[in-house]
Amino acid sequence: MGRDDGKGRLDGELDAIVRSGSFDIVEVGQQLDVLRPAERLAAIRSLGSRAQAKLYDAAKGARKLKLTDLVPADVEPFTQVVHEGKNSLPVFSTFAKVFCRPKGDGSELWGYNRSGPLLENVVGPGYYVAYEGPGDEVLIDYTRLPKDKAPGWPDIIPNHERLSRFVYNGMIDALRAVSQHVTIGRAIKHGKVQDNWFVLTRG
């Protein structure tokens, strides 16, 4: 995959390369960034749970992730920015995290999980507040709810209601930078790190 643009090249499938552990996180990020959006989405959705875990570990300290990486600074408040993704679960693994910037000082983003009408109605949309953590990560905090939402988003419901209490309640995701477009996250529930990862790409 990838294009040879002088920055190096990823030979073979991304999943196999990352699972091997023999990769440079900077080079992987550069090659992901030169792909077209559809190609980049296909690449990150090829990553299984083992590869996602290795990518998350490799991304530690590689680059500080900022809120403007998720919603660029020139995007107007309450304009949604979609990050398509894949998680490490055996079922219902494709989804999107949708972010917007509220009006204010820019210290947080608001968003929810777009997983299709069935899961959103039965489980819940999984609303969250995102903010920059003390290290290099952005924290996606399901223990906090946005005060408002972008036009067209589903109703905001607490994460202890419906089946959401088994999925999002008490959870915080730690999100790390892979490239300009790609991030990798891991779930922390009730303060305990979970063996659940997810990878996202902004179009």
Image: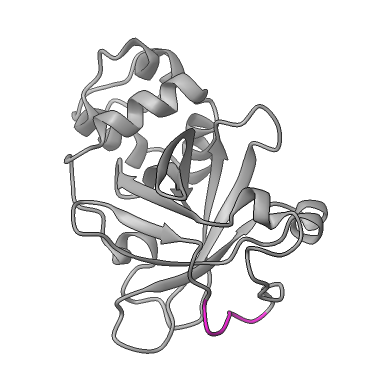
Q: How many marks?
A: 0
Q: What residue sits 31% from the left and 60% below the top?
A: 69
Q: The N terminus is located in which quarter? A: top left
- What secondary structure predominates along the stretch shown in magenta? loop
Q: Is residue 5 visible?
A: no
Q: Is residue 23 above or below residue 36?
A: above
Give whichever of 171, 25 is nearer the camera: 171
User: Residue 119's x, y, as percent?
Assistant: 77, 52
User: Residue 51's x, y, as percent?
Assistant: 42, 22
Q: What residue sits 36% from the left and 19% below the top?
A: 18
User: Residue 193's x, y, as percent?
Assistant: 40, 39
In this rendering, position of residue 4 left or right of residue 94: left
User: Residue 125's x, y, as percent?
Assistant: 67, 62
Q: What residue sits 53% from the left and 74% below the top?
A: 145
Q: Is residue 113 visible?
A: yes
In this rendering, position of residue 31 left or right of residue 15: left
Q: Is residue 171 above or below residue 15?
A: below
In this rendering, position of residue 68 left or right of residue 75: left
Which color scheme does this rendered protein use? one colour
Q: Is residue 106 above or below residue 173?
A: below
Q: Is residue 31 magenta?
A: no
Residue found at the very far bottom of the displayed protein: 104
- The quadrant in which residue 27 appears is top left
Magenta residues (range): 146-151
Q: Is residue 6 above or below residue 130?
A: above
